[in-house]
Image (tube, grey):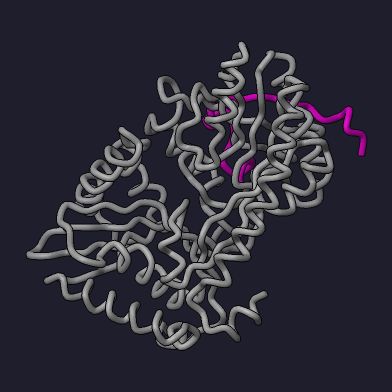
Amino acid sequence: MDQAQIEIQVLSSLAQIAAEDWNACACPETAEGGRPLDPFTTHRFLSALEDSGSTGRGTGWQPQYLTARMDGMLIGCAPMFAKSHSQGEYIFDHNWAHAYERAGGRYYPKLQIAVPFTPATGRRFLVRPGYAEIGMSALVQGAVQLAADNQISSLHVTFCTADEAEAGRQMGLMARSTQQFHWLNRGYADFAAFLADLSSRKRKNIRKERAQAQGFGGTIRTYTGAALQPAHWDAFWRFYQDTGARTWGSPYLTRRFFDIAQDRLRDDIALVLAERDGRPVAGALNFIGRETLFGRYWGCVEHHPCLHFELCYYQAIDFALAERLRRVEAGAQGEHKLARGYLPSQTHSLHWVADPGFARAIERYLEADRAAVAEEIEVLTDYGPFRRAQVEEQE
């Protein structure tokens, strides 16, 4: 195919592209039914962010959706944003920004190919089946050219897949490795079978935590699809505001996002609520993929021992087992997840920096950092909760 025939465009709103065209690239696996691999790059999720005002003017996440067309047909697209800060990314470059600006450079705005506020691995170069190589190449070249032509300092692609990271590296982008903690379903019949894989001490600790949490004086329920009601979002908004204010200074998502989620996204959501005396007192929000449950937000208005662990980690495992999902991604950070059966897993990002000297300095840093992350994953896995035979088998 002649790449010269490919037309690259930047769109300021998803309203400028039909949902079926975007989704033909973002989630082609749904063409014959079933869930997307993850819901976060679907038209419905990204448009919910935009329509709710969670992204767009005044947020520091200005949509610049990248599209590639061949003979009028969309063959690839990418959720790209012009960023005026580095908040809501979870693979952070604050130190790079400070160093560049101390040296007299202008780091912002930058370009970010990512799902805002969402540290979940998934495809970032969304390419129609049959156009994988040429589509990704066109999108990468288009994004880099756009940055260069507009004298933008850098381009960042966060939480891309391992295959994308390798392909991007071969195209000249710089690769970065980070880590999260994921739970893997090894064909467990139930939670007891999972516990049987753990060391005796960890198994006893989890049983103790679950008993303590479930004795908080109420009930724990998971709501999804038609079972979700507007009142549930009223409660969860209170939880989210409290956590957002303490963690980020202000919540990333607007209240309207959750109203839109009730209309467009409720089949993608599993909302775990702890209810006492007829009202929710804590909750954990998860998104459901084809093979993965993605833990996203937690909050509470009452503190009860171990309830956070129960709602965020153990209830997520219960849901994954019931739905026969392969894994649970529990979000960013948190070595405390290790003792609860979540093992370290490598995550990936790609970076392009316009200034050659600054790029060389970052590449030297990334080379050392990749080795450090690999070593840390190895060490943490060795200290994990599984019986030694199980760890050796996973390795």
Q: Position of residue 22 (x, y in %)?
A: 62, 41
Residue at far top of view: 104
The answer to whether residue 234 is seen in the rendering is yes
Position of 68 compared to 347: left or right?
right
Q: Quarter-wise, where is residue 224 in the image?
A: bottom left
Relative depth, front residue between 236 and 384: 384
Please report the bounds of the magenta region as a residue range.
1-25
- Quadrant housing the N terminus: top right
Position of 346 compared to 127: left or right?
left
- Quadrant housing the C terminus: bottom right
Q: At 83% across and 45% down in the image, what residue appears? A: 133
Q: Where is residue 41 in the image (x, y as percent from the top left)?
A: 56, 45
Q: At 60% across and 41% down in the image, what residue appears? A: 158
Q: Where is residue 235 in the image (x, y as percent from the top left)?
A: 20, 50
Q: Position of residue 257 (x, y in %)?
A: 35, 39
Give yes or no for residue 106 being in the magenta stretch. Answer: no
Relative depth, front residue between 183 and 275: 183
